[in-house]
Structures are given as structure tokens and as C-alpha cells.
Image (tube, grey):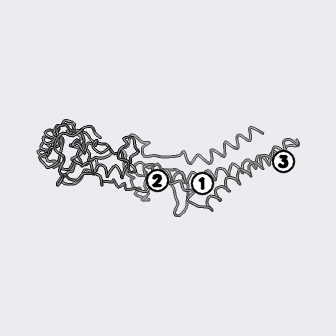
Amino acid sequence: MKILKYILILTILLGITSPLYNLDASTDHPEEPCQYAKEDTKSSTPLNPPCGYYQLLAPIITGSDTDITNFNPADENALGGYLNTMLRIFIGICAVLAMGMIVLGGLEYMTSELGSSKESGKKKITGALLGLVLALGSYALLNTINPDLLNTDINIDQQTIQVALSQAIQSDAGKTPPSGPLVGCTAGIQKTTIGMFACGKIVQAVNVMLAQAKSMGFNITGGGYRTQEEQKAIRVANCNGDITNANARCVPPTALPGQSNHNNGNAFDLKCDGVLIQTQDNKCFKWLKTYASTFGLYNLASEPWHWSVDGR
């Protein structure tokens, strides 16, 4: 009896799942280059699916609008569609297995005179019915509440990230930095050849860098100097009003007034052809990434436009 039970279960499983394994993929023929389907001259039916598709020898689902005869893993949401199909197949397998167990339980109940065997048959039938009710009931309940609960499509809407550029220094025009040495720039603030302010210690290197960039066809301009009053205003906005505590929580991180690279001519917000550099695929960013370190400037990873002596 046990052998009969196992044979019946194995037969049912093989019968249900065998179509899923009968796949004929265009990539299964290495001797043939990957190419799109050729047409049968008699029936005009593709002999092979397009490149990258798996042709099912038996459709998973049939219907006027729901035929699934091939599967392309590269398609958008292909995994979600495949999982949706497998969910329905799983419900069907549960139903078939439940019927198999009901048949086995009935045979055991009818063919045995022992009370224990009859009780075992009844338990098989009861368990199979309970499992079938759970599978179908859960599907029906979720479908009634919201059909989208049964939808496994991975569909992430494209999002646009707007980078806040309000703190970027567009130009140093009209600004007058203090004369004499500063805490972070003992050589004092000086003007570069493009009117951008820089610490006297690096001003020559910045001038050479800008000239070299221009000679190679890259028009790099921008601004760099921020007054202490401007730094205080940014600290107030970013650090819940704190302008004295170096450990205060600031979003984004903001240096204390007088300690910012922008206050001391050691940082620059650069433009390419008059437009602030906002992406790492910008041509001027790529040039700077290659050459700026030679002149002692490094990029702040979160701000493609920001270049300073220490990358901060």
C-alpha cells in the first residue's frame, strides 16, 4: 500500500512539472550563432524564439490573451510575471495533490478491515481537504481584499533626485575678503586669473590648473570664497541654529564659521562652460578627476562641483 502511494504521488508530480522542464533555448545550440527566429516557409511560424528567449514545449497558461509559450529573463518585470504564473501553477498543484490524497485515503478506507487503517484513511481525506481549503481560501481572501497583493511584479517607478545647490558658490564677483592672514590661510586671500578667490598658498597652482584646462578645451570657472557671516547663516540652517559647537548635528555636515575651507580660500565650487558641475559624467569633472590632484585639489564625493585641498 505504501509503495502504491509513493508511485501515485511521484506520477502526479512528474505529470504536472514535466512541461516546465521541457525548454528549448536558443542558447542551447552553441554551434549556431544567436540570431532572431527564422520563418517556416509553409506555416510562417517561427522555428525558434528570438535571442535570449526560452521556448516552452507546452504553454504554461493558455487563453486568447494569456498564452505563455516563451520566457525572456531580460524583459522588464519578467521575474514578476513568471512568479505570478508559478503562483497559479502552485495552486493547481495543491488541488491535484489534494485529490490524490483523497483518492489514497478513500482506497485505504475501503480496502482495509482494520479500524486503525480506516482511521488513517479518514485523516488523509480530512488533511487533504483542509490543505485545499487553506490554499484556495488564502488566494480567494487576498484577491478579495486587494488583487495587487497577489501581484509580484517588480515595478519600481523611476525617481528624480533633485540635488540642493543653494549652498554652492556660483561666483566671487562683488565680494571683498579680509586682508591679511587668516586662521586657515596664513598667506591671506588672493584673486585668481578668473576672479575667483583662493588662499595665497595655492593661488598659483589654481591659476596653472585653470590655464591648462583652458588650453585643452575645458572652460572651468566658478567661485570659492564665503564670508563668515554667510557661514554662520548656513550653520543656523543646517545645525538647528548652532554656530559654536563643533560636534553639533548638522545635515549636511557644516563647518564652524572661520573653519570652513570656503572661508579660507581652500575650496571651490566649479562650473563647466558657465554651468555648475552637477554630475560625474560631466566632461570637466572627468578632466578634474584626472588632473586636479596634480595641483593639490580633491573632490567631495557627494558634490561633483566641490573641489578643495583636502576633499572636504
Give the foreground label among 2 and 1.
2
Task: Tell whether 224 sits left or right of 15.
Answer: left
Give the foreground label among 2 and 3.
2
Instruction: Give the SS element for disc 1.
Output: helix
Q: To which residue does mark 1 refer?
A: 88
Task: Tell whether 133 sits left or right of 111.
Answer: left
Q: Where is residue 175 in the image (x, y as percent from the top left)?
A: 18, 52
As measured in the structure, the alpha-carbon distance from the residue carrying label 3 to the one carrying label 1 is 33 Å
Q: Which amino acid does label 2 sit on?
A: Asn
Instruction: Give the SS element for disc 2.
Output: loop
Q: What residue type is labelled 1?
A: Arg
As measured in the structure, the alpha-carbon distance from the residue carrying label 2 to the one carrying label 1 is 17 Å
Instruction: Give the SS element for disc 3.
Output: helix
Residue plotted at (78% across, 47% down): 105
Check the picture and name the quadrant holding the N terminus.
Answer: top right
Checking the image for residue 110, the label placed there is 3
Q: Where is residue 187 in the image (x, y as percent from the top left)?
A: 16, 37
Q: To which residue does mark 2 refer?
A: 77
Q: Nearer the viewer, residue 241 or 122?
A: 241
As measured in the structure, the alpha-carbon distance from the residue carrying label 2 to the one carrying label 3 is 50 Å
Neighbor class of circle 1 (other Cα within 10 Å; few <14, some 14-19, many 20+) is some
Residue plotted at (42% across, 49% down): 74
Q: Which of 102 and 152 is in front in this view?
A: 152
Is residue 27 depicted above or below 50 in this figure?
A: above
- Choose the circle earlier in sequence order: 3 or 1: 1
Residue plotted at (30% across, 47% down): 303
Neighbor class of circle 3 (other Cα within 10 Å; few <14, some 14-19, many 20+) is few
Q: Please, which residue is most extreme toward the bottom here?
A: 64
